[in-house]
Amino acid sequence: MIDKYVYPGIKVLINKLNIKDANKLDNAEYSIVSLNINNLIRNPISINSVKDIFVIHKLLFSDLYEWAGSKRNINIYKEEPILAGLSVNYSDHSSINSDLNKLDKEFINIKWDELKSKEKVEKIVSIISRLWRIHPFREGNTRTVTTFLYLFVKQIELKVNIDFIGKHAKYFRNALVMASIDEYSEYEHLTNILMDSISLKDINENKYNTIKEYEVEKYTYQTHKIKK
């Protein structure tokens, strides 16, 4: 399958800045998207549906990509070191809309104001891990889902410390992976860091150095590849 999202002959995403060097694009993307995330957190949108991730993605990435805010139309995978090089089974591109609709029915029927903090966290972990597993976009899924999380927890008055999560970003990202491996999913890693980010009391932060025996600081960004 041809990757229509990259420049012909090079593995660099086609972008509005016409940057064709992967490292330069990574640097530009980091700066632009980080600024857009901060702006969105300061001026939040209302989250009413899991499909609001399309709005978030467009706000974060439209300075760079024409397809920002649109679902991918190819199938992708990513080799995960924490899974010994295996990939999470992302949704087939033809199933993204139906998978989001199914998840959204559950999301909009949750009576968040009737839940205690731990119950809210458990529900959020279930929702965002499945949302991340769908992986609707060619690039930017983790940042979009994490921003969705930041906006929504504030909306339901759950006092999650986003600086704490940012400090342990590699742990958080790999916890998303571990919560998205179908029947083998382990939700406790995400639950623990979210609960600790609320309490911020008597935390042994060394526990965020590893997930099982995997040292999260060893994680380096892996690019998505195209399923043939």
Image: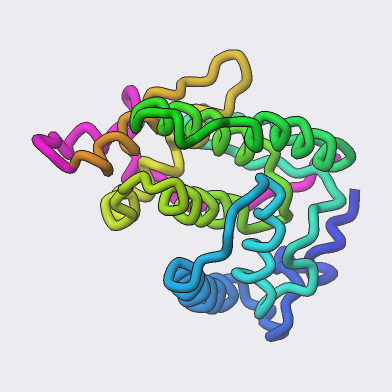
- The location of residue 227, given as percent across then percent down, is 80, 40
- At horizontal 85% and vertical 48% (from top left) the residue drawn is 74
Q: Residue at x 46, y 52 (%)?
A: 155
Name the image quarter holding residue 117.
top left
Residue 201 seen in this snapshot: yes
* Residue 115 magenta: no
Picture layout, residue 14 above or below residue 214:
below
Residue 29 pos. (x, y %): 56, 73
Residue 204, magenta (yes or no): yes
Q: Is residue 161 left or right of residue 219?
A: left
Residue extending furthest toward the left: 202
Q: Looking at the picture, how far across and down is residue 150, in whole percent?
A: 45, 53
Task: Report the side of 194 relative to 50 (left or right).
Answer: left
Q: Which one is nearer the viewer's eye here, 12 or 129?
A: 129
In the current view of this chain or complex, which residue is farthest to the top?
Answer: 183
Picture quarter with the C terminus: top right
Left or right of residue 160, residue 45 in this image: right
Q: Is residue 221 above or below residue 175?
A: below
What residue range appears in magenta? 200-228
Q: Position of residue 190 (x, y in %)?
A: 40, 33
